[in-house]
Image (cartoon, helix red, strand yellow):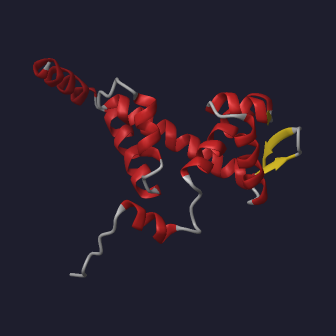
Amino acid sequence: MGRKEFHTVRGYELLQQGEALTPSMEDYLEMTCRLTRIKGYTRISDLANALHVQAPSASRMVQKLAELGYLDYERYGIIRLTVAGQQIGAYLLQRHQTVERFLRTIGVTENVLEETEKVEHSISGQTLRCLQDLLAFLNRDNEWQQTLRRKKRLAD
């Protein structure tokens, strides 16, 4: 049996550096994906409002994401996702929805969006697929839901 190496959270982040976007970049791409699904494009002001940040901050991040090839952006113009941006944005949106659905399924009711944001940036693709499989199974089996509700009522 091989020796396992443990790292701090930051250590794992450093091991993946160069492969992954920062959580902030992911949030911008995810929100851009959400907003562009409505009109096919978005603007800095729409993005800034949706993420509750100042327009100059949104503009800087959009420029970074454009440099990385995820967005097409003209200064003071519209923002569109590139093909790569669409693919990653769709994945990030699906990841967010899966984590949120999982948390709601297990009974989390307070600060669900905040909890989702904290969790979604730290799970791997494999963990996401396992969560999706678990949710699919749980949705087919109502008995476990009734058992969970009973146990929660008893605990309250």
- Image quadrant of residue 57? top right
Residue 123: x, y in percent? Answer: 42, 52
Quadrant of the image occupied by residue 107: top left
Q: Residue furthest bottom?
A: 2
In front: 83, or 122?
Answer: 122
The residue under the point 43% across, 50% down is 128
Residue 25, position in %: x, y? 62, 50
Q: Position of residue 22 (x, y in %)?
A: 57, 55
Q: Residue at x 34, y 64 (%)?
A: 8
Q: Is residue 36 left or right of residue 16?
A: right
Q: Quadrant of the C terminus?
A: top left
Residue 155 vs residue 115: left or right? left
Q: Which residue is pictured at 62% across the width and 33% down the height?
A: 51
Is residue 37 in view from this perspective? no
Asked whether 105 or 76 is in front, the reply is 76
Q: Position of residue 112 (x, y in %)?
A: 41, 29
Query: Would you place residue 36 above or below residue 86 in this image?
Result: above
Picture layout, residue 102 above or below residue 14? above
Question: Which of the 4 image quadrants contains residue 53?
Answer: top right
Seen from the viewer's position, the closer of residues 117 and 134 is 117
In the displayed structure, would residue 62 be above or below residue 13?
above
